[in-house]
Image (tube, rainbow, N blue to C red):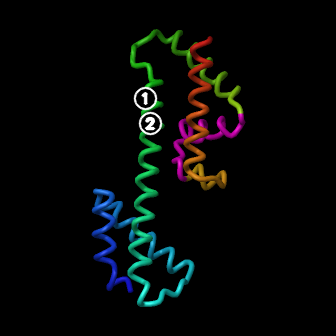
Amino acid sequence: MFRQHYRQMYRLATMLLHDDAEGKDVVHDIFAHLLRESQDLREETAEHYLLTSVRNRCLNVIRSRQIQERVEHLYMLDLDTTITPTERLEEELKALYKGINQLEPPVCRDIIMQHFRDGVTFKEIAIRLGVSETTVYKHLRRALNQLRTHLNNK
């Protein structure tokens, strides 16, 4: 089945994603899922099922990209690129940590710390918390908005 449908699935994935590596990842993820779930596909519906799976998986990847780009854009807006004295930076850092400690709900604080302090990816955070990546992005956006408000009011 892999040899029979791989080329067509890969072509569709790269056409939708405009990225060879991600296209291969999508196709491999689908076959890995089939092996894990040990699903039996009927030959007459296999092609349609596989191509639909590729399309849906590609749409999920595109959606994740868009959300991540929005979060990164929000984060970039928060960065202050001006050079400031060390004392001021220390004060701002203290204010930032104070704001982080006051984040509500606590899951926002956890997500901020895991992502920015520990370098954990959004996908890994979602797995750890047992939620979707979209939920992680929404909590992160909420946390960044709260921090922005806190820092502007200090």
- Our reading of the magenta stretch's main secondary structure is helix
Where does the magenta region start and end? 105-123
What separation in Å lies between label 1 and label 2 (alpha carbons)?
Answer: 6 Å
In the rendered image, the quadrant that contains the N terminus is bottom left
Secondary-structure class at tag 1: helix
Residue visible at 43% across and 85% down in the picture: 45
Secondary-structure class at tag 2: helix
In the rendered image, the quadrant that contains the C terminus is top right
Q: Nearer the viewer, residue 96 or 106?
A: 106
Residue visible at 56% across and 52% down in the picture: 124
Circle 1/circle 2 CB separation < 8 Å: yes
Residue at mark 2 = 72
Q: Residues within 10 Å of mark 1 (few under 14, many from 20)?
A: few
Q: Position of residue 123 (x, y in %)?
A: 53, 52
Which residue type carries mark 1? Met
Is residue 133 toward the left or the right of residue 129 in the image?
A: left
In the image, residue 81 above or below residue 64:
above
Was residue 76 drawn as part of the magenta stretch in this picture?
no
Which residue type carries mark 2? Glu
Q: Which mark is residue 76?
A: 1
